[in-house]
Amino acid sequence: MSDDPLPIQPDDPTVHLSGHLPPPSPGRRWRQLDRLVVVVFCVGLLVPGVLLAARVRPPAIENRPLLVAPKATVGSLLDRSWYAAVDRFIADNIAVRPIAVLLRGQAYWLSGGTGNPAVVRGTGSWLFTREEIQPRCDLGVSDITAALDRIDAAFTAAGQDFRFVLAPDKHVIYPEKLDPGMPYGPACTDDRRPAMRAALDARSSFAIDGWAAVLAERAAHQDGPLLYYVEDTHWTPTGAVPAMRALINSFGPDLWRDDDVVTGPPTRASADLARQIGLIRRDTVPSVTLRPTVQIVQTAMDLPVKTTGAPAVYRIIATGDRPMVPGVTVIAYDSFFGRNMAVLSRYFAESIWIHINDLMFHPEIAKLIGPIDRVILDRVERGLYFTQIDDLLRPLVRSGG
């Protein structure tokens, strides 16, 4: 052991302990800056808590609802998972969180990533949802086609008409926008696609092959407007038109007219995938109006159930100088048709729009909406192979139509 004295000897009055402390600020301004830093730090700790207590909540910027506080019970006080849920709720509902999310998202973007495993980065600015790159495939092609046959037979026996529309995933229309180095194998939907397309073609009397319609549109207009958004999961208004044309033509040759497709000024749509990684981005694409001389009146139906897939179940009445699909048409939709509700409804004298999640969780809605002449189901490809189609639509089957 060294015989050198200890650096600090408290018993020695000649030793001044301040010699072991950082030197004081050299001037008054520096001392004021020190105090300001301390004040800002304390405010940064207190303000988020005060805003949370005052019920000031941040906007839902990541394309999902904010977490809600878990219920407190006597048992929850001894449950570690309850405290973890409280911690997640507080972190999600801090009013200044969007700023942190934005900074984090920008940092990941600049580093070449996304910071969210649900969002896959493609080439350039292109983004894809992980759901379509690694989809869920609980059902096979034979399961889907058997369900389609069963529900079509049920509607036919009830005197009702039926249509099914398949919306393609984005990477199918723009495969070159995927990152060739991404660490994922072929999607199960890719493996099933040839057989599914053949099955839909064999059922062309009621099934619409959206792949064929949209791929043909891209092949015919290579330099035309985008058919899918760059930083969003959905097709653009221009991309939806080919599938809607195929659907409407299935009801008769006198309904669709190409000159009824009116391209308007560019619109800026909020990009849902960008929001999921904390970035506020908008894709700019041309607007599209179908049948501009047809007027629609949309109302939210008064039903004794709370919908969650959409704000409401909507009834739309269309009138104008164009022939309409007569009677009452129920459209069970996901977001691909939901974004085009005001466009597609101009072909139907009366249409009732029910989000598939609301129909799934509240099948009693089917009994509350009155007589039905036909049913249209749209489903995006990545959701097809876990959707029990006949179970979903069977409540809409009416004896005698």
Image (tube, rainbow, N blue to C red):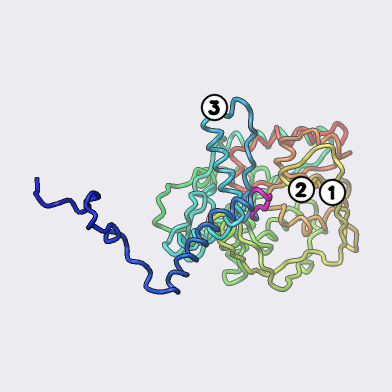
For marks 3 and 2 on the same chain, the one whose residue lies earlier in the sequence = 3
Camera-nearest residue between 310 and 260? 310
Q: Is residue 128 above or below residue 367?
A: below
Magenta-colored span: 53-58
Residue type at mark 3 is Leu
Q: Residues within 10 Å of mark 3 (few under 14, many from 20)?
A: few
Question: Disc 2, disc 1: CB below 8 Å?
Answer: yes
x then y, percent, for residue 209: 64, 50
Label 2: which secondary element: loop
Per the rendering, the mark at residue 37 is none
Residue that badge 3 annotates: 78
Q: Is residue 364 above or below residue 277?
A: above
For marks 1 and 3 on the same chain, the one whose residue lies earlier in the sequence = 3
Q: Residues within 10 Å of mark 2 (few under 14, many from 20)?
A: few
Q: Residues within 10 Å of mark 1 (few under 14, many from 20)?
A: few
x then y, percent, for residue 50: 63, 52
Q: Residue at x 20, y 54 (%)?
A: 7
Q: Is residue 57 magenta?
A: yes
Per the rendering, the mark at residue 300 is 1
Camera-nearest residue between 388 and 161? 388
Task: Say which quadrant the C terminus sits in.
Answer: top right
x then y, percent, for residue 211: 60, 53
Mark 1 and mark 3: span between their CA atoms? 45 Å
For marks 2 and 1 on the same chain, the one whose residue lies earlier in the sequence = 1
Residue type at mark 1 is Ala
Q: Is residue 294 left or right of residue 123?
A: right
Residue that badge 2 annotates: 311
Label 3: which secondary element: helix
